[in-house]
Image (spheres, grey):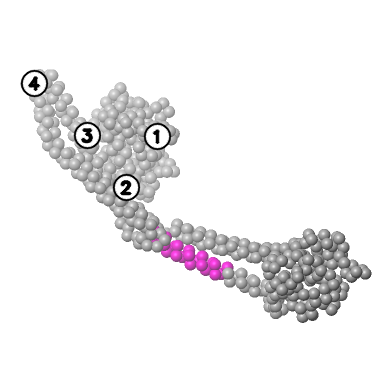
Amino acid sequence: MKSLWKISRRYIWSAILVTLLVCVINLALLLYFTFININGVEQKEMGRALMDEIVREFSCGDGGWQLSETGYEKLEQSSFLWAMLLSEEGAVVWSYKLPGELPLHYSIGDVAAFSRWYLMDYPVRVWRNGDLLCVFGMEKGSIIKIQAVYDMELIERVPELLKCLLIANVVILIGLALVMAYRFYRSLKPIARGIESLEEKKVLGLSEKGVLGDLAAKLNQTSALLRWQDEKLSKRDKARTDWIAGVSHDIRTPLALITGYADELAEEKSLGEEERKKAEVIRRQSLVIRQLISDLNLTSKLEYQSQPLQKEAFSPAGLLRECVAEYYNDGLPEKYGIELKINDGVEESCFLGDTGLLLRCFRNLIGNSFRHNPQGAEVLIELSKKREGIHLFFADTGCGIPEKVARALSEREGFLQGKTKEKQQSLNTAGHVEAGEAEGAVHVMGLLIAKQIAEAHGFRFYLQERPQGGYDVEIILVPEGEII
């Protein structure tokens, strides 16, 4: 909803700025056109300066009033259609292209009338020269003359009135902008709620009317589609989990019989040495199959969050010591060794977690190092405290985790550390091609379960690349799960 309010607020400010800009532009255009209209008449070939220049070219001789050649040139170049010179008595004493329909004598009233309005529909301009009155006529319909009379008190109040008018216009436009913004906000509000509900996988029922009706309809369709897909995925995941659990249960009984009979045959004295060795091989492989079934069942439950966590307080340092002690108590071969290094500030750290699953995670990581280094290796475990949390680092003096495993487990972004983007993409691509090979050749199931157990506790699981090749494992126990 905060994002919706931000959008509406931006819309309001944009509307206010546009309103003010429109008002300023309108006022500027009004002043500009007023100036152009007033100044244009004077600038055209009919202004006062031109009339004064023409009138100055008149002279009175024996033949009466005459206009010089210069005056005639200026008159012909002007926008005036005709001209005449009136005496004090109103008689025409000189004329230029005077229309025949116009009279040759005018009264004072006639002069007052056409000076203010028109002379027989001809717009005219008058200019006084001593006792004479020069009348310049223009083409009919070329100019519109408007006469207005205003009270002086009103004229003096024009700036104040313009200010009030401008304020009123701004208030009205801003009010309209606010009303439109509110309506826009009301239309967007259910859309925003619908988008938030999509994340929660709720079924939408947005009204498909109004300006945003098409968008609401699309959201309703998307909601229904996501709901349908989620139901299909849930059914598929449940069927997969149930199938794996059912197969695991059904295999346990015949597998127990095979293991039991193989154990008896391996101990049978009447059999030859070769037959007892074969029985021992059958027994060991039966145990491997049983472990693989257990791993498959566990990884399936962890993947779909159906494995309950029996959380209790535990110390990472104490749990690692317990895990290492179990290996030595069970008789660790001489070619293998485990070095546990616990740095300062870690002993007192305490977290909540399922200790059984966490021990399984640690055993898988240590067992992988032994399994991938048949010639012998030493496992190095370091527990340290850093800013991000408690860091648990697993490495060995052997080859490390093979590249095939990295290919199979690098599909999730950020899983690998120390990789360039191009390298990460190449591993992702190769992982899809060779995942089956990696799982069969390097027993990726154990590492995958370790990763799933760590992530089920909210811990971060990474593969750290070595400079010489191969990978080590780093687990970060985040502070959120720590008990202080």
The picture places residue 31, in percent across and down from the top left corner, at: 67, 65
Amino acid under disc 2: Leu
Mark 4 against mark 3, which lies toward the viewer? 3
Q: Tag 3, which secondary structure?
A: helix
Residue 73's image quarter? bottom right
The label number, if any, that marks residue 271 in the structure image: 4
Q: Tell me the residue that label 3 is attached to.
A: 292
Residue 19 percent location from the top left of the image: 56, 63
Q: Does residue 7 sit above or below 113 in this rendering?
A: above
What residue is drawn where x is 24% and y is 29%? Answer: 331
Q: Secondary structure at mark 4?
A: loop
Q: Closer to us: mark 3 or mark 2?
A: 3
- Position of 67 with respect to 279 (left or right) is right
Q: Along the polypeptide, which appears first: circle 1 or circle 2?
A: 2
Q: State the SS at label 1.
A: helix
The residue furthest left is 270
Number of residues whose C-alpha sits closer than 10 Å to that of mark 2, classed few (under 14), some (14–19) or many (20 or more) = some
Residue depicted at 70% across the width and 75% down the height: 147
**Residue closest to the far front:** 100
List the residue tagged with mark 2: 352
* CB under 8 Å between discs 4 and 3: no
Region in magenta: 170-191
- The amino acid beneath tag 1 is Gln
Q: Which residue is mark 1?
A: 425
Decide which of tag 3 and tag 2 comes sooner along the chain: 3
